[in-house]
Structures are given as structure tokens and as C-alpha cells.
Image (cartoon, rainbow, N blue to C red):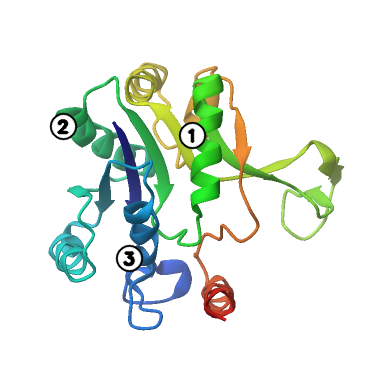
């Protein structure tokens, strides 16, 4: 069984909004529902679990019913960190799918993921045992201590920007969280970083520039523009 685990615990502080960004409406539909619909319509995905804010659980349940997200198996309350939220979601998956199942972890506010990205992630997972969507860095990159002065230029041809989905065997994620707890690693927002911290290799699958994570007002404007282009 392949389960999509969507993380949707953001509070919208970087957007300056009272409504969490994943629940902002674009064309009368919450951003999170756009993401859910991709996995609902993807034949590779058997079930969906969403980790979200406690105060939005019933709202999400109502939206899922309204937009016919029938693969939604469970809605889980997030933790105090991204790492804890993912662990809560993994625990829920273990109950109905078991540790031998596959999990595809994805940002709920990354609604332009495509079936091609999902398929390539799963193909990479099947070959190497894990997959992290990533894209090459095309801009010049500098390291800076204060955000004002660039102290060191980094070779962009060696740099990749990771996105989601991340695909793993559920038992591997459980093991990673156990080792992280033993090592005192407790605040990684991305599972690929957690895996790297405990010494696991990170294998890249194909991401895309359009696989946008909506965290700012500018991101929201780009999403609206890309959505309009798709409709055209």
C-alpha cells in the first residue's frame, strides 16, 4: 500500500494572515484541496493521511467531503515541530497500512505537484529504497553570516534544492525517528534532512520549478498565475 502523508500544520505567520496558508482559498477552493486532488486522482496512491492543526480538523473533514476526497483515511493533529508532526502521521499510517507499506511525504501547501513527479519519485524509490524530489540550482549562490555581505560563493553546479515528495518505506522512517531521538536530533522540518543527519544517503528524483511551495504572498501570486496558465 502507498500512502500520501500531507503535512499541513503551518500557521500562516510569514503571510501575515489569520487563516493558515494551506486553507487560503484560490478560485473558491482551499490550497490544500488542490494538493489533495492530485493524490486523489493519482492511480499510484491508495490512501491519504493529513497532519494539520487541531482547530482545523473538522474544517478539513468538511472540505474533504465537499470535494470528494475519498482516499482520505485519517486526519492527524500535528506536533510542536515538523519532525513530530511527521512522526504523528507515520504512527497513523502504521495502524492501518503496517510498517512494510510505502509513504510519500508531501507538503500540503505544494499544490502543483504532478503525476509525473509522483511517478518518478516512486520509480527512484523502487530502485534505491528512497527518493527526494530535487532540482538543480541555476542561480549564483553565496554564503552569508548576516544576510548583508556575501562571504563565500558556492559552486551552483554542485547544489540542489530539495522539494517534496519524499518516498520511504514506513519502517525506515520509524527507525530514523528512533535513532534521531537517541541522538538528540529533534527539530528537522524535512525527512530528507533527518535521514541525512542519521547517516542515510539521499537519492534524488525529478522535481520541477513549478512544484511550488506556497509560503509567502509572492508564492501565492505565482500559484494563481500558474493555475490560470494551466486552465488556459
- Quarter-of-image position of residue 2: top left
Is residue 104 or residue 79 the one in the foreground?
104
Compared with 10, 66 (above or below) is below
Q: Is residue 147 left or right of residue 203?
A: right
What residue lies at 50% left-to-right and 65% top-to-bottom? Answer: 214
Label 1 or label 3, whichever lies nearer to me, is 1
User: Can I make out residue 25 in this image?
Assistant: yes
For this view, does 58 lie left or right of residue 171? left
* Residue 40 in the image, given as x and y percentages of width and height: 32, 54
Residue at the disc numbered 2:
96
Closer to the chain start, of discs 1 and 3, is 3
Q: Secondary structure at mark 2?
A: helix
Q: Nearer the viewer, residue 184 or 188?
A: 188
Residue at image mark 1: 122
Find numbered disc 3 in the image and state the secondary structure of the residue it sits on.
Answer: helix
Label 2 environment density (alpha carbons within 10 Å; few <14, some 14–19, many ≥20): few
Say what secondary structure mark 1 lies in.
helix
From the image, tell me which residue sits under label 3. 33
Percent position (x, y) of residue 78? Answer: 25, 48
> 10 Å neighbourhood of mark 1: few (<14), some, or many (≥20)?
many
**Residue at the (49%, 44%) spot, across then down:** 118
Frontmost residue, 90 versus 68: 68
Q: Earlier in the sequence, mark 2 or mark 3?
A: 3
Tell me which corner region of the image, top left, top right, bottom left or bottom right, holds residue 79: top left
Q: Position of residue 94 (x, y in %)?
A: 21, 28
Residue at the extreme front:
43
Q: CA distance from mark 1 to mark 3?
A: 22 Å
Amino acid at each position: 500500500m502507498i500512502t500520501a502523508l500531507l503535512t499541513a500544520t503551518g500557521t500562516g505567520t510569514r503571510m501575515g494572515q489569520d487563516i493558515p496558508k494551506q486553507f487560503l482559498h484560490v478560485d473558491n477552493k482551499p490550497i490544500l484541496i488542490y494538493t489533495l486532488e492530485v493524490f486523489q486522482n493519482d492511480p499510484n496512491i491508495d490512501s491519504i493521511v493529513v497532519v494539520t492543526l487541531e482547530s482545523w480538523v473538522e474544517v478539513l473533514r468538511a472540505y474533504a467531503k465537499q470535494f470528494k476526497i475519498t482516499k482520505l483515511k485519517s486526519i492527524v493533529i500535528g506536533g510542536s515541530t515538523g519532525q513530530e508532526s511527521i512522526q504523528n502521521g507515520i504512527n497513523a499510517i502504521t495502524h492501518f497500512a503496517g510498517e512494510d507499506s510505502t509513504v510519500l511525504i508531501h507538503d500540503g501547501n505544494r499544490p502543483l505537484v504532478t503525476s509525473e513527479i509522483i511517478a518518478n519519485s516512486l520509480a527512484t524509490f523502487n530502485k534505491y529504497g528512497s527518493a527526494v524530489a530535487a532540482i538543480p540550482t541555476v542561480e549564483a549562490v553565496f554564503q552569508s553570516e548576516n544576510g548583508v555581505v556575501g562571504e563565500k560563493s558556492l559552486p551552483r553546479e554542485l547544489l540542489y534544492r530539495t522539494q517534496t515528495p519524499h518516498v520511504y518505506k514506513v519502517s525506515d522512517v520509524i527507525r530514523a525517528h528512533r535513532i534521531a531521538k537517541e541522538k538528540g536530533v529533534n527539530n528537522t522540518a524535512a525527512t530528507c534532512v533527518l535521514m541525512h543527519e542519521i547517516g542515510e544517503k539521499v537519492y534524488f528524483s525529478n522535481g520541477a520549478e513549478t512544484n511550488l511551495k506556497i509560503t509567502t504572498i509572492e508564492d501565492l501570486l505565482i500559484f494563481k498565475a500558474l493555475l490560470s496558465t494551466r486552465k488556459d
